[in-house]
Amino acid sequence: MADGYSPFSTGDIYYSYYSLGAFDGSSPIMEGVSELADYYRSMVTLKDGATLVASYTDGVPLVAWDFGGKVVGINMYLGVYIQATGDYQTLIYNALMFASGEINQYTVTTTATNGTITSPNNPIVNHGDTTTVTGSANAGYYFTGVSGCGGTPQTNTNQTITTFSYTTGAIISNCTVSATFAVKDGPDLNGTWQSLTGRSFGSRYLVRGSLLVSNTGNQGAGRFTITYYLSDDGVILGSVLRTGSVFRLNAGATGRMFFSYFATESLQGRYIIAVIDSGGVIAETDEKNNLVVGRLN
C-alpha cells in the first residue's frame, strides 16, 4: 500500500494472542463477525481522521477505515503460517464489500396476526437504514402491539385504535417486525338472506323473504331496527319498503326475520337491501357489515 493510505500508524510487531474486544456492531464490516484472535499483529495507532471499527481486548486497533470508506485496514497477519482464528474470512469479505461501495441489504419480514401490513410489506433495507412499517386491524379487531428489528416496542389496550406506525432501529441483519391485533369486545350484527322471492298476482307483485340476523360479537345487543329498501342496482338505497325491530340478540345467536311486501308493479331484477341497526343505536365492533343485499330474479 502506498504511504499515507493506511488508517493506521504502524508500530512494532507483537507476538501474543489477543482476541476481539470492543467493536461497532452497526458497521457492515462487522456483520457476522463475533470472534477473532491473532498471534501476529502490530502495535498500531489510529491516524487522525480514520474511523475505528474494532479493537483487540487490550485496546490496540484491529479494524478501521479512512478516505470515506475507500480504504479499510485490518491489523492481522493472514499470510503463510497464519495464526488467526475466528471469523476473519467473513471480516475480509465485508471489508472488500465496504471498500468497493457495495451495500449489504436485508429483508425486514413483516407479520400481522388478525390484521394487515399496509406499507411496506417485507421491505428490503440497506445496511444501517431504518424503515417505518404501518398496519391496520381486520374488521372487528383492534391494535394491541408491535415490536422487532430494534425499534421501540408498542403496546395498546384502547379498542378504538385499529392502526399503527412503527419505526425500526438501524437494520444490520435480516429481522422480523410482528404486529398483533385482538378481537374487540361488543356485539357485531350482520345477516344473510335465507330466501328472497317475488311473484306476480294479477296486477300486484308479492315479495317474500327470510332474513337471518346474527350477532357474531362477544356481547349481546339490545333493541335495534331493520329497514328494508328497494334498490335498482344493489348499491344505492332507494325507497323504504318496511321496517322491523329485534328486541334483543345475544352474543353468538341468530334470529330469523320474515319480510313481505306488495308492489303495484313487477320488481323482477331489482334488489332488496336490509339495513340492520339502521338507526345506529348499537355500538358494534364492525359497523361496515350491516347491509344485506338480495336480488329478485
Image (cartoon, rainbow, N blue to C red):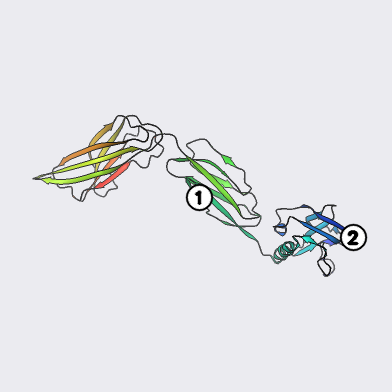
| Residue 125: mark in rendering | none
Which image quarter is the N terminus in? bottom right
- Looking at the image, residue 95 lies above or below residue 180: below
Name the residue located 79 percent from the left edge and 60 percent from the top edge: 85
Please indicate whether residue 173 sits to the left or right of residue 203 in the image: right
Q: Amino acid at mark 1?
A: Ile
Please indicate whether residue 216 sits to the left or right of residue 76 in the image: left
**Can the viewer see residue 38?**
yes
Image quadrant of residue 248? top left
| Residue 117: mark in rendering | 1
Image quadrant of residue 92? bottom right
Q: Secondary structure at mark 1?
A: strand
- Looking at the image, residue 25 lies above or below residue 227: below
| Residue 14: mark in rendering | 2
User: Nearer the viewer's eye, disc 1 or disc 2?
Assistant: 2
Q: Amino acid at mark 2?
A: Tyr
Choose between 89 and 64: the one closer to the eye: 89
**Can the viewer see residue 50?**
no
Name the residue located 81 percent from the left edge and 55 percent from the top edge: 19
Please indicate whether residue 199 sits to the left or right of residue 219 in the image: left
Quick one: which residue is furthest to the left in this view? 202
Please indicate whether residue 133 sits to the left or right of residue 64 in the image: left
Q: Secondary structure at mark 2?
A: strand
Choose between 71 and 44: the one closer to the eye: 44
Give residue 246's position: percent from left, percent from top. Answer: 29, 32
Q: Earlier in the sequence, mark 1 or mark 2?
A: 2
Name the residue located 30 percent from the left edge and 38 percent from the top edge: 213
Q: CA distance from mark 1 to mark 2?
A: 55 Å
Choose between 235 and 210: the one closer to the eye: 210
Image quadrant of residue 276? top left
